[in-house]
Image (spheres, rainbow, N blue to C red):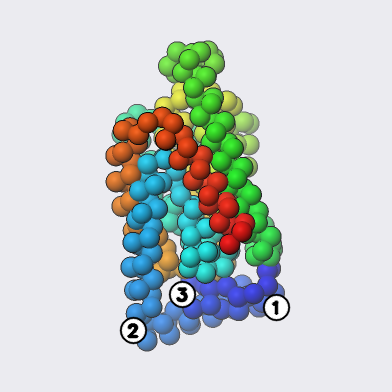
Amino acid sequence: MGSGSRSRVGSAPVPRSPAVAPATRTVAAASTTISSAAAGGRPDLETIALLAVVTFALGVLLGFVGAGGAGLAVALLTAGFHLPVHQAIGTALAAMCFVTVAGAISHYREGNVAPRAGLIVGLAGMAGAVLGANIGQGVPEAPLKLAAGLGLWLLAVLVWLRTRLAEKIVTTGPPGTVLGIGADLDKPPLLPSLGLGVTGGAAAAFLGVGMAPFLQLGLLVLLKLPLRQTVGTTMLTLVFISFSGATSLALHGDVSVPHLVGTTLGLASGSYLGARYTGRAPRAVLRAAVVGTPLLAGTVLIFL
């Protein structure tokens, strides 16, 4: 466990001590939440309102670039709202669960989801998320925050690779192919699907980042899905991964309800608005925003 203090399910911090059992910490967190509610809950309402406003602007950016936002939410919650990184990760994953459900439904209606591939990768991702969440409990806050920042920098590189690969697919192969190789949507390869899900889920829950670029590249290259279906299928897998990771971290007391409510309200409404402007943006501006967003979030986590 890390040193320092961590908030639990409420908004007031509870000391993070290796000698305190998880069950004892959870009881202490519940007591803190009840005390806050009895006092009128005004700090919680202020936190929800402020977070909703701030994350609305963030959600517009995320909707514009087509990202889930867990990594940016972790950076915001730690640097701007001073949540311990473990709790910021749990809260961000829980918020991402709500956001990705709406996105997955929309993509499914548009025919942009390969259901069988999404289910296999997503269910494997659930197991990986439990593993990543539990491993993260034993990592001190400072190294975990650094790892999350470096993970976001890696995602920025993966986003850039994804955009380059997407251009190559468009210019060298017909729709529904990857570099000229057709995809069998009814029979996705089992072992690559399981491996992609477990590694993506473990990294997402450990670092608190959505791993969408990693999953999209895997769906393109390993499962050979059509380009347009990688986005929707990734959204479906992230529903499973974020739900499993958030649930596991909540059992450790690492989800702040007031911060979750404010973050979810802001991200969901802002993303809806931002997505409407994606098709209107010049390609160069969109690419710079897609790569720069995780790069900026990683920089915040590492240096602030």
- Is residue 79 something that shows in the picture? yes
Q: Give the SS element for disc 2.
A: loop
Q: Which of the marked residues, 2 or 3, is nearer the chain's N terminus?
A: 3
- Mark 2 vs mark 1, CA separation in Å: 32 Å
- Asked whether the beta carbons under mark 3 and mark 1 sit within 8 Å of each other, the answer is no
Q: Give the SS element for disc 1.
A: loop
Residue 112 placement, left or right of 178:
left
What x and y, as percent, mark residue 234?
A: 47, 37
- For disc 1, the marked residue is 19
- The amino acid on which the numbered mark 1 sits, given as a three-letter code, is Ala
Q: Which of the marked residues, 2 or 1, is nearer the chain's N terminus?
A: 1
Packing grade of label 2 (10 A; few <14, some 14-19, many >=20) is: few
- The amino acid on which the numbered mark 3 sits, given as a three-letter code, is Gly
Residue 97 placement, left or right of 151:
left
303 above or below 126? below
- Mark 3 vs mark 1, CA separation in Å: 21 Å
Residue located 43% across and 56% down the image: 95
What x and y, as percent, mark residue 248?
A: 55, 59
Residue 1 in which image quadrant? bottom right
- Mark 2 vs mark 3, CA separation in Å: 13 Å
Residue 10 tag number: 3
Residue located 33% across and 68% down the image: 49
- For disc 2, the marked residue is 40
- Is residue 251 something that shows in the picture? no
